[in-house]
Image (cartoon, grey):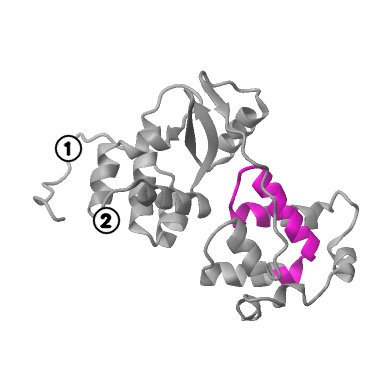
Amino acid sequence: MSEASFNGFPARAEVTPLPNIFFTEVLPHIEDLAEAKTVMQVFFLLSRRKGYPRFVSFSELNSDPVIVKGLRNLAPVTDDLLKRALKLAVHNGILLYIPVDMDGRSEDLYFINNQAEKDTIAKIVQGTLKIPNVSIRQEEKPEVEQPSDIGSLYEQNIGMLTPIIVEELQEAEHRYPAEWIQEAFREALTANVRNWKYIHSILKRWEREGKKDGKSVRDSRKERDPDKYIRGKYGHVVRG
């Protein structure tokens, strides 16, 4: 710590609840310190939020003194630094967000990624849950581009490739038909969920229950181009 040393926790300190899975499956994989600090403060703020639904806005985080002080120790504080930390948290499946217009200005609302908040976001998007002075920001419908390989598909629509993600993409490319992967990306983006785990869950559900077009993995695989994802500039990444 760069300032005066911490004197220790008082005997009756308030606590902020965090799921045990955060410490066992989330924290070990957070590599960016700005992301870690931001996520911790989001949990803190939401634990003290009253009412329903519970979310925190980008503007609130951008003016939060703990966030400002915490990020200032890493680099000059800018909107971009916080946006990058939040984008990583969304990308890594820790947070969810929806773009809205709030009191006449563009805003992003962030939620903890769990099933209850996914249901809440679905209600907000569908219009069955109204938030005063808030409306979904109308953005151009995301289009899944047709890249020449699965690495480009991921980078163009979700984020940076990591060694772990590359391995998972390789496995998915060999397991699922190309058109399934494209459609799973499209379904996730339409739901405003830019997260590989969510996309993979769609693919596993289709494999388990059958896809709506009636085709199984085996039937669809017969129609696929086996070389589609190993062409292009990221072919060497997918081939390993």
Image quarter where the N terminus lies is bottom left
Q: CA distance from mark 2 to mark 1?
A: 34 Å
Under mark 1, the amino acid is Ala
Image quarter where the C terminus lies is bottom right
Taking 170 as reference, is 38 above or below it? above
Taking 39 as reference, is 162 above or below it? below
Mark 2 neighbour density, 10 Å: few (under 14) some (14–19) many (20 or more): few
For the residue pair 114 and 102, the one nearer the viewer reads as: 102
Q: Is residue 167 left or right of residue 9?
A: right
In reply to whether residue 178 is colored magenta, the answer given is yes
Q: Which residue is labeled 1 in the image?
A: 11
Q: Give the image quarter of residue 63.
A: top left
Under mark 2, the amino acid is Ala
Q: Can residue 17 be seen by looking at this rendering?
A: no
For the residue pair 238 and 30, the one nearer the viewer reads as: 238
**Which percent across, then down, holds residue 85?**
40, 51
Q: Which residue is labeled 2 in the image?
A: 75
User: At x 58% / y 53%, what residue is drawn?
Assistant: 195
**Which percent across, then down, holds residue 165?**
57, 67
Query: Of helix, strand and loop, which one carries label 2?
Result: loop
| Eye-nearest disc, 2 or 1 | 2
Q: Of label 2 and label 1, which has the lower sequence position?
A: 1
User: At x 34% / y 39%, what residue is drawn?
Assistant: 62
Query: Of helix, strand and loop, which one carries label 1?
Result: loop
Q: Is residue 224 left or right of residue 82?
A: right
User: At x 46% / y 32%, what residue is drawn?
Assistant: 55
Q: Give the image quarter of residue 13.
A: top left
| Discs 2, 1 touching: Cβ within 8 Å | no
Q: Give the image quarter of residue 207.
A: bottom right
For the residue pair 178 and 81, the one nearer the viewer reads as: 81
What span is colored magenta in the figure?
Answer: 173-200
Prevailing SS of the magenta stretch:
helix
